Image (cartoon, rainbow, N blue to C red):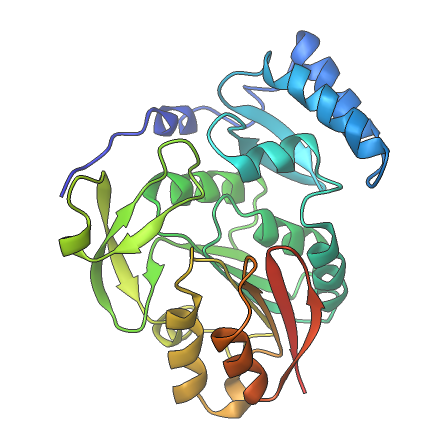
Amino acid sequence: MQRRSNPVDAFFTDRWGAHRPRGWGGFWLKVARSFPGGWPWSRFALLARRIARRRLDGPVDTRVWGQRLRLFPDRSVSEARILFLPRSWDRAERRLLGEWAASPGFRFVDVGANVGGYSFWVASRMAASGRVLAVEPNPSLARQLRFNVRANRASDRVGVVEAAVGAESGTGALTVGARNSGENRLVDDAGSAGQATVPVRVATLADLVEEAGMDRIDCLKVDVEGREAEVIQPYLSDAPRTAWPRHLIVELKGRRGALEEWITARGYVRVLRTKLNGLFRLA
């Protein structure tokens, strides 16, 4: 198993604010964010983003949705979109999730949290009694999540677990996207030959929820690069219906069929379908 060092990790020893965007990079970042979402303004925003990206290297300390975040736009497609176009990033999903998160004591589990776009969005919308569990197997991304949680002094409301979620507990190998840190996949050791991988803990969703002391899940979001069924199906098969998430956000990415049919057959109603995700409510 090959281990890959990540130079990004060196940027988590200084305080948040040390990498605020300045000069022309900061100017074009403000321009990109100034346009409202939707057509035709997105065209102008994308042009401003292209100019800003040429001038912003390495980490950028910024406020998004009122949250302090350190982002690396050159490393991740999601980070670039959250940094430059926060109004447009998963807009439809965030609208519904924001409505759900307003419920008192909201409990959100983010499996495949990446840099925490969904987790920090919920943190910005939920009441003080709400809780977020962000689960991310990539060690570098998990470290970034923990840094941003500390920057927001939110450790009492947002927990970070460094693990992959699978059908069984154990250990596994995670491939790390060379050009996009969001493209991480859990693979069998036999299938990882020739690929740079990192060893990771694998846990079931039931184990992680129990370890976190969550008495329920109000919304479960799952984005694990095609292995969503291994997260959702074992949990719903074993847990009593009273413990099932009230809402689901599942990456489907153009896929229709088996998983969506399996979910709806158990009483979930699809309330939204976007290019990437399906959103479901337990009837």
Q: Is residue 92 left or right of residue 255?
A: right
Q: Quadrant of the N terminus?
A: top left
Q: Position of residue 234 (x, y in %)?
A: 37, 80
Residue depicted at x 31% and y 29%: 6
Residue depicted at x 53% and y 64%: 255
Q: Above or below — where is 214 with respect to 142?
A: below
Q: Is residue 248 left or right of residue 163?
A: right
Camera-side residue of 212 and 108: 108
Residue depicted at x 37% and y 71%: 230
Q: Quadrant of residue 188?
A: bottom left
Q: Is residue 42 left or right of residue 224?
A: right
Q: Position of residue 16 (x, y in %)?
A: 54, 28
Q: Above or below — where is 120 with respect to 215?
A: above
Q: Position of residue 3 (x, y in %)?
A: 19, 37
Q: Quadrant of the C terminus?
A: bottom right
Q: Quadrant of residue 280?
A: bottom right
